[in-house]
Amino acid sequence: MKHKRYQNMAGYSFISPFLIGFFLFTIFPVLMSFYLSFTEYDLIGEARWNGIENYKRMFFQDELFWHSLKVTLIFVVTSVPFKLIVSLAIAILLSKIIRFSGFYRTMLYLPSIVGGSVAVAVMWKQLFGSRGAMNAILESMNIPAVAWLGNPKTAIWTIVLLVGWQFGSAMLIFLAGLKNIPMSYYEAANVDGAGAWRRFVKITLPLLSPVILFNLVMQTIGGFMTFTPSFIITNGGPLNSTLLYVLYLFRRGFVFFDMGYASAMAWLLLFIVAVLTALVFTSSRYWVHYEDGR
């Protein structure tokens, strides 16, 4: 009994750094932000309890809140399918490559490693600037230059393109799913005379649907948390056309020092993402197919 207790204490001592870090840097900040969402707090003075005033102000007084939520929903609805389609298409191409496949996977994954960095966002800003490479290409074809970042109708699409360019993680997950599909299914379809598109629709998509579900959930969560491109490339402009939710949350908390309101926005974002994730999982029973037939 004493030896067992000693083993338990030894185990807890080994995991104590993780436990201390988890409670100190994860659990405590989460609980603290929940408390602050019901307070008026400016990061300098003491937090003053104001009940649900932050939430009432958010829903009934703050037009920018609704605008940022609308922009974020448009961004997620467009960028997530675009990223999934691109990553799936490239994964299918890579699955057919035998020689130097590891090299190609590495090269195509690189944008995902550096894509979320400030340096790449600055590069993207220069690329789509008024005198950037994109306009230089257009002018070389006698096409008028486009104010990509200065036009509210086009600014958001530059960020969508940047996010779609970071397809590496989703691509690798799709590639792993494709490798697990038995080739005997495709061989049987070939014998029956099924074409490439029919094999894709009837075999690849159904057997890959669990992987699609995983990527859809992860990319949707990541889409709602997108911050760096909007902050670096356009800073929410022009005319707040790229004011994503997290960027507006950042402004409320660290520009206007309205941390209580920012905490309320953070908890609402958690609720929105949780509801959307639950809806995706609920709908999965109609389009996700598992090998055991569930």
Image: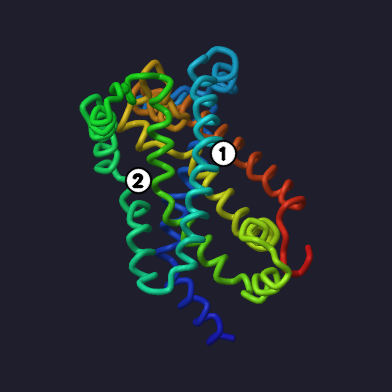
* Number of the label disc, if any, that sits on residue 294: none
- Sequence order check, earlier mark of 2 and 1: 2
Q: Is residue 31 left or right of residue 146?
A: right
Residue 292: quadrant of the picture: bottom right
Q: Amino acid at mark 1?
A: Leu
Q: Secondary structure at mark 1?
A: helix
Residue drawn where x is 61% and y is 60% of the image: 196
Q: Residues under labels 2 and 1: Cα distance?
A: 21 Å
Q: Residues within 10 Å of mark 1 (few under 14, many from 20)?
A: few
Q: Is residue 132 left or right of residue 46?
A: left
Which of 37 and 112 lies nearest the eye of the viewer? Answer: 112
Q: Amino acid at mark 2?
A: Gly
Residue assigned mark 2: 116
Q: Position of residue 84 (x, y in %)?
A: 52, 49
Image depth: mark 2 or mark 1 in front: 2
Q: Is residue 220 left or right of residue 286?
A: left
Residue drawn where x is 24% and y is 35% of the image: 133
Q: Is residue 53 left or right of residue 165?
A: right
Q: Position of residue 121 (x, y in %)?
A: 29, 39
Which of 234 and 16 lies nearest the eye of the viewer? Answer: 234
* Number of the label disc, if any, that sits on residue 270: 1
Identify the image quadrant of the C terminus: bottom right
- Answer whether labels 2 and 1 touch (C-beta < 8 Å): no
Identify the image quadrant of the N terminus: bottom right
